[in-house]
Amino acid sequence: MSKIKIGLDIDGVLLNTMAEFLNLLNWKKGTNYERDDIKHYELTTCFPITKEDEALYFSNLSVRHIPLQDTRWVEVINNLIHHLKAEIILITCNSDERVKEYRRLLMLHRIPFHDIINIPYGQLKTNVLKNLNLNYYIDDSPYQIEAVKDIQKTYCYAQPWNHSVNGVYRAYNPLQFYSSVKDLETYGRDYTIG
């Protein structure tokens, strides 16, 4: 089996960044918003905040408090690396300082990876993903998914804010993603979600 390259988005796929965002928002505004209150990727349409508020809240997140989206990612990524001989590339749109913090956090969570690619905040990942020649990619952003779904096998990591995404595989958890990739690599067909 030849080595495969898998790209994983960090915020919203590996890390539950939205949980820490909601903690900060609720603390600042005295509210009780929950994950299911996020019906759209544009947070200004979900909450009484401006774009400036949103950017400020995200820049002030305490990275060390951001939990894994799902603790099964540890097992899944290890299986991708050891059983499927995959190269794992993490992709994010953040500040360089935030990426350094993410490296430390992911090491604490025991998430193995080969590289982190940082794209300037607010830009689409299209050109970078074309150059990476990934076999598989998973993201939660409807905008990023739409922009890259024709480049490689793209998965939408199911979140309340991306129900409108069509034309890609939808993974509801890390085990489903792993099973799909494993079936495609082993049998040339996905027996789990497609």
Image: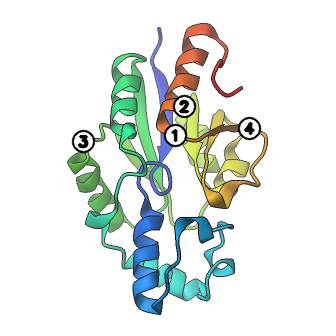
The residue indicated by pointer 3 is 110
Label 3, label 1: how many angstroms apart (C-alpha)? 18 Å
Q: Measured along the vertical axis of the image, is residue 46 above or below residue 84?
A: below
Amino acid type, callout 1: Asn
The residue indicated by pointer 4 is 150
Please say if the residues under marks 3 and 4 sit with CB atoms less than 8 Å apart.
no
Pointer 4 local density, CA inside 10 Å: few below 14, some 14–19, many at least 20: few
Pointer 1 local density, CA inside 10 Å: few below 14, some 14–19, many at least 20: some
User: Residue sitting at 73 percent across and 38 percent down?
Assistant: 150
Label 2, label 4: how many angstroms apart (C-alpha)? 21 Å
Name the mark nearer the viewer: 2 or 4.
2
Please say if the residues under marks 2 and 1 sit with CB atoms less than 8 Å apart.
yes
Amino acid type, callout 4: Asp
Label 2, label 1: how many angstroms apart (C-alpha)? 6 Å
Please say if the residues under marks 2 and 4 sit with CB atoms less than 8 Å apart.
no
Please say if the residues under marks 3 and 1 sit with CB atoms less than 8 Å apart.
no
Label 3, label 4: how many angstroms apart (C-alpha)? 32 Å
Give the quarter of the image for residue 85.
top left
Earlier in the chain: of badge 3 and badge 1, it is 3
Give residue 111's position: percent from left, percent from top: 30, 41
The residue indicated by pointer 1 is 173
Amino acid type, callout 3: Arg
